[in-house]
Amino acid sequence: MEEIRIYKKNDSDSSDTLYKKIKIKDTEIDGNLFLAPTAGYSDKPFRQICSDLGSSFNYTEMVSCEAIIRDNEKTLKIMEAAENEKMRAIQIFTGSPESAVKSIKNILKFKPSLIDLNCGCPVPKILKSGAGSDLMKTPDKIREIVKAITENTDIPVSIKVRSGFTSDSINFLECAQMAIEGGASLIALHPRTRAQGYSGEANWNHIKLLKDSVNIPVIGSGDLNTPFDAKRMLKETGCDGVMFARGSFGNPFIFQQTRDLLLNNTNPSEPLFTDKMKIAYRHLILAIDFYGEDIAVKEIKKHLCSYTKGIPGAKEIRDKFVRCNNLTDYENVFNSLISE
Ligand SMILES: Cc1cc2nc3c(=O)[nH]c(=O)nc-3n(C[C@H](O)[C@H](O)[C@H](O)COP(=O)(O)O)c2cc1C
C-alpha cells in the first residue's frame, strides 16, 4: 500500500504557480489552501488531519466572545492548536466591541496566527445577539469591532463575510471596506446571501469584484468540492487563496490533491479505500484523545460516514458505523473492512 504523505511544518514549495504564499500583515502563510471554519467539523482532530494532508491554514469552529470571557471550559478547548497545524485562525462571534476586547486576553493564550470575526453565520440564535450575518445590516459595527480588536493586539485580524443579508441588500464591498478601515488584514468571502443559507450557487463573481476592489488578501469560499474547482476559482476570480468547507468533509485528501494539481499539474487520483480507512481510523483515535471515548464515539459518526462517500457499499458501511458504541466496536468494523 502506498504510504500516505504527511506534510511537516517546514515543507517549502515553489511559488511560481497558483499555489503560493500569502502575506498577512507581518505573517507569511506558506500556501494558499485554507480549511474553512465549520461548526461541528473543524475541531482539533479534523484540523490535525487536514494539516497532515497539506492544508496551509486552518480556521477553528466559531467561538463566542461571551463564553471566552466566562472561561467556559468547552469554548477554551475549541481554541487549542492541533499538532503539526502550521497556522490557525480563531474565529470569534460577537455583536459587541466591548466583548471582543474583553475576550482578547484569553484568546491570546492559545497563540492564534489570526483572529477572525464571523460576519456570515445565518443561525437565528446568533443573529439575535447581533452577531454573525446580523453585522452585515450595520456595517459600521464591523468597523468598530475590528478596530477594537486591532487596537488591542498585534495579531492580524480578518473577517469572513457573505455577499449580503438578502439578494436585495448585497453589500460585501461595503462590509469589506468597513473591516479595512478598522484595520483588517484579510477578508474571506462566502458569496451566498444569508437568505440562501448553504443552498443555491455561490456567486464567484463577487469574489472577483472584491479582489479587484481591495489591497489585502482575499480568500474565496463556496462550492469548492474538487481540486479543479479550487483551480478554477483561483484563475477566474484572482483570489489569493481558497477555503474548503463541505468539500473537505470525509475528504481531507482534497488538500494534497489540490496542492499537487496547482504545483505540478498532476491530475488528482481517488485515494485507495484502505488509505481512506487508515485516515478515518486516525481521525477516530484523535477524536478519542481530544473528547474522551464517550463523546468521541458519537461525535465521530458524521465524519466516518462522510469518509464512505463514493465507496461501493457505502450504505452498509455507514450502517455499521452508526451501530458502534465504543472504540472496540469501531475497531471491529475497521478490521473487517480492511480485511475484506
Ligand atoms: C456544517 C457547516 C458549519 C459551518 N460553520 C461555519 C462557522 O462556524 N463559521 C463560518 O464563518 N462559516 C461556517 N460555515 C460556512 C463555511 O465556512 C463555508 O463558507 C460554506 O460552507 C461555503 O463553502 P462550501 O459551499 O464549499 O461548503 C459552515 C458551513 C457548514 C456546512
Image (spheres, rainbow, N blue to C red):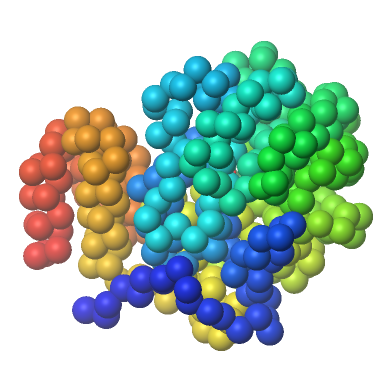
| Residue 40 position in % (x across, y down) | 44, 35
Residue displayed at 41% across by 71% down: 7
Q: In this view, does 332 lie to the left or right of 307?
A: left
Number of numbered callouts drawn: 0
Q: Position of residue 249 (x, y in %)?
A: 44, 50
Locate residue 208 relative to residue 196 in the image: left or right.
right
Question: In the rendered view, does 128 fall on the left or right side of 38?
Answer: right
Ligand 1, seen in the image, is in the quarter at top right
Give 22 or 147, whichever is nearer the viewer: 147
Say which quadrant the C terminus sits in. Answer: bottom left
Relative depth, front residue between 205 and 93: 93
Q: Where on the picture, by quarter, is residue 15? A: bottom right
Q: Is residue 148 visible?
A: yes
Which of 126 and 257 lies nearest the eye of the viewer?
Answer: 126
State the residue at coordinates (87%, 58%): 215
The N terminus: image quadrant = bottom left
Side (left or right) of 56 relative to 207: left
- At 39% from the left and 64% from the top, the residue drawn is 52
Residue 49 image point, x, y percent:
37, 57
Q: Can residue 170 be seen in this view?
A: no
Q: Position of residue 99 (x, y in %)?
A: 66, 21
Tell me if residue 14 comes above or below residue 142 in the rendering.
Answer: below
Q: Which residue is drawn at 60% across and 27% down?
A: 103
**Closer to us: 63 or 19:** 63
